[in-house]
Image (spheres, rainbow, N blue to C red):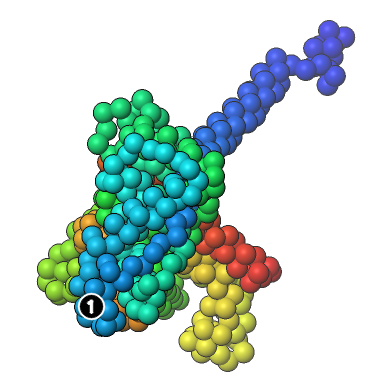
Amino acid sequence: MTETSQTNSLFKISDKTKNRNAAERRFRIYGILAISIGLLMLLVLASTIILRGTSAFQQTFITLEVDLLESKLDKKGNRNIDDIKKVSTFGYSPILVNALKKVLEKHEISTSLKKKALGGIISKSAPSQIRDFVLEDVNRIGQTVEFKFLVNGWIDGYIKGRYSRESVANSKFASAEQFDLIDQLLEVGVVEKKFNFDFIFGADASDQRPEAAGIGVAMVGSFYLMLVVLVLSLPLGVAASIYLEEFAKQNAFTDIIEVTISNLAAVPSIVFGILGLAVFINYMHLPQSTPIVGGLVLTLMTLPTIIISTRASLKSVPPSIRDAALGLGASKMQTVFHHVLPLAAPGILTGTIIGMAQALGESAPLLLIGMIGYVATNMPTTISEGLLSPNSAMPAQIYEWAKRADPAFIERAWGGIIILLIFLLTMNTMAVILRRRFERRW
């Protein structure tokens, strides 16, 4: 009797209990380990993007006092805008070289560089910058004006540590002598590295001017894409969800529709791009590479996500709300739109914003409709132009930069990823705030 009582004592932990407790401890360790690995990978990803992308927000500039010589820009001296327009950017290049020589003489800097190599220090966008300045007001000809020009992408890369004198020993784009001259100009303050707003607000540039490339026009293209997606997907998705959840009878037909919507949510995005190419461009003959076509394609991709999230929000509204409204004499339509829909609004807004955030980061559908290959250089001036004129989008622009050979474009691709992630984080934060702001508890 005594031995049995000691064996079954509550104060003694049995072997099964020990094994169960050990299994629980192992599970906790596995969970902590999994979370730690996930956080570590996230930290590695974030740090890699930040370390490689932040340099795109800074650019090297050179300050020059340029003599807008009448003998070069207006040989007839009549200030005729048509005659002045005939002077191409090549006509402005000698003016830049002369301005750089003046700086070297002023600071008593000597160099063995020839005119071509000396002018190669400055970005190829500089002549266009002066030309636009002159054409804006031809009366500026004859004046001496201070300009801040971008330096060549290779020179900028040297200052940022991408290149060294050894790495350009056999290069035709830069030379060790140019680097020596830049070091002297840095010492006297003529050359400086500063924040580059043109990267955020500017347009893309050709392969010859990577230092002048910006993502601003592509951001505008993404804005018009999201505008089309919001205007089309929100009312269509909400209307379809309300009908399926509140009005449609449960039968084989609605079951097929529900399964189809669930399957569409899992279809690869590039399939929607093929559909957009076949229907919107080849059949309907809508203009290629335009935000309106991209928005239509992304709307098809976003609709399943919005429908699924909206239906889940409608289901979360307690049936007692419907019963109470119907019991007080409200019609089915009044019950849905006056009571159920407002209570489901937080979930609907959350699903819509998350679906749009997913669409914002898509590049595969845009590749199929041509937006991936279009170099956007001009800001649209009207809404119709923004929707119907060829443009690019942020993910498409990032992809375009990443496939170019020049390391300066790779740097801009990382910087573009930072801007895209800021947009995505902002949209997801808005979704959380709106949900908590309008959420009601029963």
Q: Position of residue 262 (x, y in %)?
A: 35, 58
Mark 1 burial class by Cα count in 10 Å: few <14, some 14-19, many 20+: few
Tag count: 1
Quarter of the image with the N terminus in it: top right
Q: Residue at x 47, y 55 (%)?
A: 63
Q: Work out whether residue 432 can be spotted.
A: yes
Residue name at image x 78 percent, y 17 percent:
13
Q: Residue at x 84, y 12 (%)?
A: 6
Q: Which residue is nearer to you in this view: 59 or 57?
A: 59
Going by the picture, which residue comes out furthest to the top? Answer: 3
Spot the residue most to the right: 2
| Badge 1 element | loop
Q: Residue at the left extreme?
A: 283
Q: Position of residue 46 (x, y in %)?
A: 52, 41
Residue 295 position in % (x across, y down): 32, 69
Relative to 441, residue 373 above or below: above
Residue 225 in view, yes or no: no
Q: Is residue 219 depicted above or below 410 in this figure? A: below
Camera-side residue: 104 or 420?
Answer: 104
Relative to the observer, which residue lies in front, 125 or 256?
125
| Residue 397 falls in image quadrant | bottom left
Q: Residue at x 36, y 74 (%)?
A: 141
Pointer 1 residue: 76
Q: Quadrant of the C terminus?
A: bottom right
**In the rendered view, does 423 fall on the left or right side of 300?**
right
Say which of 69 and 257 sits in front.
Answer: 69
How far across and how far down the image is residue 232, in percent?
A: 36, 75
Residue 418 lies, with reference to residue 130, above or below; the image says above
What amino acid is at disc 1? Lys
Position of 423 with respect to 384 (left or right) is right
Quadrant in the rendering for residue 257: bottom left
